[in-house]
Each structure stands twice: as C-alpha cells, then as structure tokens.
Image: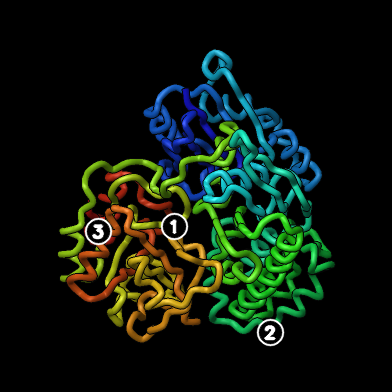
C-alpha cells in the first residue's frame, strides 16, 4: 500500500505517490493532463497514472479544509460548503462514495507545514531552518520552522515565528502583477522579468504607502483586494522594478530574522515566493547551504503532505517524477537538428515535477546565434523582452557564470547568475546580464549525455532550454501533446 499526497480544490492541483521505503514513485500536475493552466481539480488521466503504482492505503491532504473555509469567510470570499472536509473533497475529485472501503486512512496537514515538509524531507540536511513565504495558506503567509530528525529518524517541526493574513508578501507581488496588466497567481514570473527593464525609483513610495513594518512584513492595507488606481500612472517597467526591489527587501528581512533565531545555517526555502529566482540570488548572505525543492508552490505540497504521512526522509533523486514517455533519450536526432537548424524540442522520459522544464519536456536551441532568442520567442508567441535559460555541464558552469555565495549548484533553475560572456551567448542573457542557469551533474541523465556530445562537437558546454508548451497551455505531457506542438509550430519534437 502506498501513500497518496494531494493538493487540489483551489488551484495548481497535483498528486504524489510514495511507498513506505520513502521512494517517490510519482508526482504530477493535473494541468498537464487537462491542458488548463493552474487547474484546480484532479484530472481523470492523472488518476490513471496514479493507479499504475498500486493501491493506496493513506491519503494525505496539503491543508486543513475547514480552516481554509473560515479564512475565506473572514476575507469575504464566502464558504464553499462542499469543501469543508477532506471526504467531501475526495468525493468531488475522485468520485469515491465509500471512502473507508477504498482508503483506510485519511489525514490533513496545515498548509505551511506541508510546504515545510516538502522541502525539508527532500533536502540533504539532518537539521535546517525552514522558511515558507507564499500568498496565503489557511491563515499563515510567512512561517519559520526548526526542523530536524530525531533519534528514530522521524521528522520533527517546531514553528518559531509566523505572519498571518492579510499581511502577505505573496499577495503584494500578485497585486502588482495585476496592476501592470498581467494575470495574478500565474504571471508573477513575467513581472520578475520585466523588472530588469525598469528603474526602481518608486520603491520608497511603495514602501511608505503599503508597508506598516518592514521587519515583520506587515502591510497598511489588505492587498488581497488589489492596489489603488493611482499607481496606473507609473511606467509598468518601473513599477515592476520597484516591486521587485521591495519584495527583496522584505524577503531578506525575513531571512535575517530566520538566521538570527540560531537554529541552523542550512536553509530550506518553500512557498510560491521561493520561485522568485532573482531574489534568491542573495540568500547565501544569510545561510551557508540552501535547498529549494524544485516545486516549492502549492502543487509541490502534494509531496509535502505525503512526506508528513510517511514521517521520515524521502529518497530524493531528481525532479523527473511525472508522466513517462518511454524509450531512450533521443540524443543523436536532437544533435543533428541543432547543428543544422539550431532549434528542436524533446519530450522523453518522466515529466518534470515543478514549473520549469529541465530537459525532458524542453525546447532546446543553440545559445550562440544572434537571432535565436527572437526565433524562440516567435515560436512560443511570447513577449520579446522575456529571457531564456541556459542548461550547462555543471563542472563548467563557473567558467561561464558568476554564482553568488550559497549556491553550490543550480540544478533546478532556482537562482540567477551573471553571465561572464553575454556577447557570446545573447540568447540566454537577460537585459541585466543575468541568466537563470540550470547546471547538470554527471548523473547519467539524457540531458547530460546530450550536453557532453554537444560540447565535443561545438566546444560549447550549454544549450538554451525553455519549456515545451503551446501558448496558453501547460508544458507538454505526452506524445500526443508533442505531436500537436509539431503541427502548430513546425518544430520537430523528439521522443
């Protein structure tokens, strides 16, 4: 019997399956099956993939439903009477009418604790300070935890400090996202990219008008309701730059607080705000070692809930945990097309668990060409200002990028680094000279073999890597999705 962890019912539905040896058997996003971005419900084909791994004896849910509904009542969103209990949610999501006959054990865990466990129990640390920053859980918006394993190897958590709704760094950044005309809870990463083109001259004004106390990230107004219209007169790029600067100020103050609690110099950082790789570049100023599980948002808490039900360290190997397109990684055909045309796609092996393509559901390109960036942006039908990421042989990364303290590798694109030679690699450098680097160790993976052979042929140890997706849809999941991508954009996708 396995443990099934679930995040569903509100946004970013996902599921994770682990066994009682701590192996992560599967973890996948519902949106990849339904093709609806941020899908809140568990799709029937995701359930089919879950069932491939055998019977489930314990279902773990990523938050406390009744607490969530009380907070929604307080915030004016109203109560959804069909989501007050886990049983109600599972009946809706899975159609189980006789739950006890199907699943012997059901558990619910607090939202921020699920975030914390998803990070700590996949980390390499025996003891860590865990920081969770997101938009909102049930009530917590920021929490700091002391995490360790006891003498029997069981994970123990103690909350050291927290901030509660409506004071929220995540809601602040989402409000700015909406203010510049983007979609909140979806396009925050675009706002981060816009910030490089602006001047942060409005940071002080934003701070004065919105922040009650910068040291505990308390706000003067409930940003769940949005921002005042007077900000519409500010240039959007300048507003993005100012919001990014203010977010970093607030995050770093939380990190100082966490470090000064003197629990551990190992940092585990989780929650949706942990996806802000620009802010993450300076985390090494506060902690010696850093682990951000590659899916730190709510979808990743499906694994966090399962980890709590298991209670011990999980056997983390990598983020390739989703739907499988079987067969060997197509290294040779990819090389042939990259050398002749410069761009191709790959959909091979297990899909990535997390929002970033890591080589198994990727659009790949030669990073050296002067027109590559524009060609890839045209294929993906997205704004021309948006940067692309490089994927590089890990042992050569320092020769091409300057990493900040605390980042010993960057295997999941969790931080930016300064490119040493931006003129040589224009396709993977942002306007500010940074790159969201993915480093690949000698792990025997398909993307590693591809990079090794690409380097032999070209003397270039990196490729451009961006997610393989049709505009408006999540990443490609199965071969049928890859075929649709080929048909729509005329780009070969190899499996």
Q: Are marks 1 and 2 in contact (CB under 8 Å)?
A: no
Q: Is residue 431 left or right of residue 179?
A: left
**Secondary structure type for disc 2:** loop
Nearest the eye: 405 or 330: 405
**Whether residue 317 is situated above or below residue 346 in the rendered picture:** above
Query: What's the residue at 28%, 68% (across, down)?
Result: 365
Residue 343, quarter of the rendered image: bottom left
Q: Is residue 308 above or below residue 369?
A: above
Mark 3–mark 2 CB contact (< 8 Å): no
Residue at the image point whose x is 51% and y is 27% from the top:
94
Quickly name the residue at label 3.
449
Q: Which mark identifies residue 356?
A: 1
Residue pictured at 71% horizontal, 55% vertical: 263
Residue 201 is tagged as 2
N-term-proximal mark, 3 vs 2:
2
Label 2 CA crowd tier, 10 Å (few <14, some 14–19, many 20+): few
């Amino acid at each position: 019997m396995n443990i099934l962890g679930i995040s569903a019912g509100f946004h970013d539905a996902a599921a994770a399956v682990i066994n009682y040896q701590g192996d992560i058997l599967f973890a996948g996003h519902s949106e990849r099956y339904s093709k609806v971005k941020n899908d809140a419900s568990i799709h029937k084909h995701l359930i089919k993939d879950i069932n491939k791994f055998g019977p489930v004896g314990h279902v773990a849910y990523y938050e406390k439903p009744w607490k969530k509904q009380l907070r929604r009542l307080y915030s004016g969103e109203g109560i959804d009477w069909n989501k007050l209990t886990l049983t109600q949610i599972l009946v809706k999501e899975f159609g189980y009418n006789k739950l006890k006959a199907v699943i012997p054990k059901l558990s619910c865990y607090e939202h921020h604790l699920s975030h914390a466990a998803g990070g700590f129990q996949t980390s390499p640390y025996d003891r860590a300070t865990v920081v969770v920053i997101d938009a909102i859980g049930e009530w917590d918006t920021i929490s700091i935890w002391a995490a360790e394993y006891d003498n029997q190897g069981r994970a123990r958590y103690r909350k050291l400090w927290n901030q509660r709704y409506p004071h929220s760094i995540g809601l602040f950044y989402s409000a700015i996202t909406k203010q510049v005309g983007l979609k909140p809870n979806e396009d925050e990463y675009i706002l981060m990219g816009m910030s490089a083109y602006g001047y942060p001259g409005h940071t002080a004004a934003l701070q004065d008008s919105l922040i009650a106390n910068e040291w505990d990230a308390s706000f003067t107004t409930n940003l769940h309701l949005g921002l005042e219209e007077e900000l519409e007169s500010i240039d959007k790029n300048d507003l993005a730059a100012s919001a990014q600067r203010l977010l970093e100020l607030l995050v770093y103050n939380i990190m100082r607080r966490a470090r000064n609690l003197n629990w551990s110099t190992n940092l585990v950082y989780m929650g949706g705000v942990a996806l802000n790789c620009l802010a993450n570049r300076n985390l090494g100023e506060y902690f010696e070692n850093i682990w951000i599980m590659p899916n730190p948002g709510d979808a990743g808490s499906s694994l966090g809930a399962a980890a709590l039900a298991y209670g011990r360290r999980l056997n983390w190997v990598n983020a390739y945990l989703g739907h499988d397109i079987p067969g060997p990684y197509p290294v040779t055909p990819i090389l042939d097309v990259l050398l002749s045309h410069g761009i191709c796609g790959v959909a091979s092996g297990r899909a990535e668990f997390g929002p970033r393509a890591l080589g198994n559901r990727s659009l790949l390109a030669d990073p050296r060409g002067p027109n590559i960036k524009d060609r890839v942006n045209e294929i993906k039908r997205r704004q021309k200002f948006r940067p692309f990421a490089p994927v590089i042989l890990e042992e050569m990364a320092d020769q091409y990028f300057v990493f900040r303290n605390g980042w010993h590798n960057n295997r999941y694109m969790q931080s930016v680094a300064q490119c040493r030679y931006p003129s040589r690699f224009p396709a993977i450098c942002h306007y500010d000279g940074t790159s969201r680097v993915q480093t690949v160790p000698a792990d025997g993976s398909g993307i590693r073999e591809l990079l090794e052979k690409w380097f032999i042929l070209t003397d270039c140890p990196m490729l451009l890597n961006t997610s393989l997706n049709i505009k408006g849809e999540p990443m490609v999941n199965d071969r049928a999705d890859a075929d649709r991508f080929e048909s729509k954009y005329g780009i070969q996708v190899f499996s």
